Image: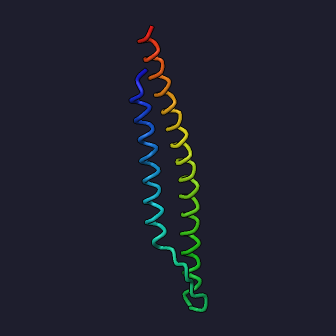
Amino acid sequence: MNLIPLLIVWSVLAVGVLALFVWRKVVARNEDDNLHVLDGAAVQQTATQLAVVKKLEMIDRWGKIVTVAAVLFGVVLGGLYMYQTWVQNSSIGV
């Protein structure tokens, strides 16, 4: 069994996790933890911050999904590799 295509799929998932991490850092740079509510521009800042928060929540949701998928796929891939190695070593001794 050739595991190279599965390894490529897992690599794409891992790169996806890294891309989502970087994207989140870029978006979070615009987040302001200290809103000045008494300013006249508070309404605009609040609307902007709500948009940033919504985007961060979406990125976090997809980040969790892709991370879990990458970990599970990696565990399955590791299991397949160990099984394949075990079968090959078992057939050599016969």
Q: How many marks overall?
A: 0
Q: Quick one: 90 or 18, which is closer to the camera?
A: 90
Residue 8 position, x and y percent, is: 40, 36
Q: Colour mode?
A: rainbow
Q: Quick one: 86 or 6, which is closer to the camera?
A: 86
Q: Quick one: 35 or 93, which is closer to the camera?
A: 93
In this view, 81 is above or below 48: above
Q: Who's the residue at 41% across and 47% down the image?
A: 15
Q: Where the N terminus falls, by quadrant? A: top left
Q: Where the C terminus falls, by quadrant? A: top left
Q: Who's the residue at 56% across and 46% down the image?
A: 68
Q: Quick one: 78 or 93, which is closer to the camera?
A: 93
Q: Who's the residue at 44% across and 46% down the image?
A: 14
In which quadrant of the rendered view does residue 92 lie? top left
Residue 54 position, x and y percent, is: 58, 65
17 sits left or right of 57 in the view: left
In this view, 85 is above or below 90: below
Residue 87 position, x and y percent, is: 47, 17
Residue that lies at the very extreme toward the front in this rendered image: 93
In this view, 10 is above or below 62: above
In which quadrant of the rendered view does residue 57 lie? bottom right
85 sits left or right of 34 in the view: left
In this view, 83 is above or below 77: above
Residue 30 position, x and y percent, is: 47, 73
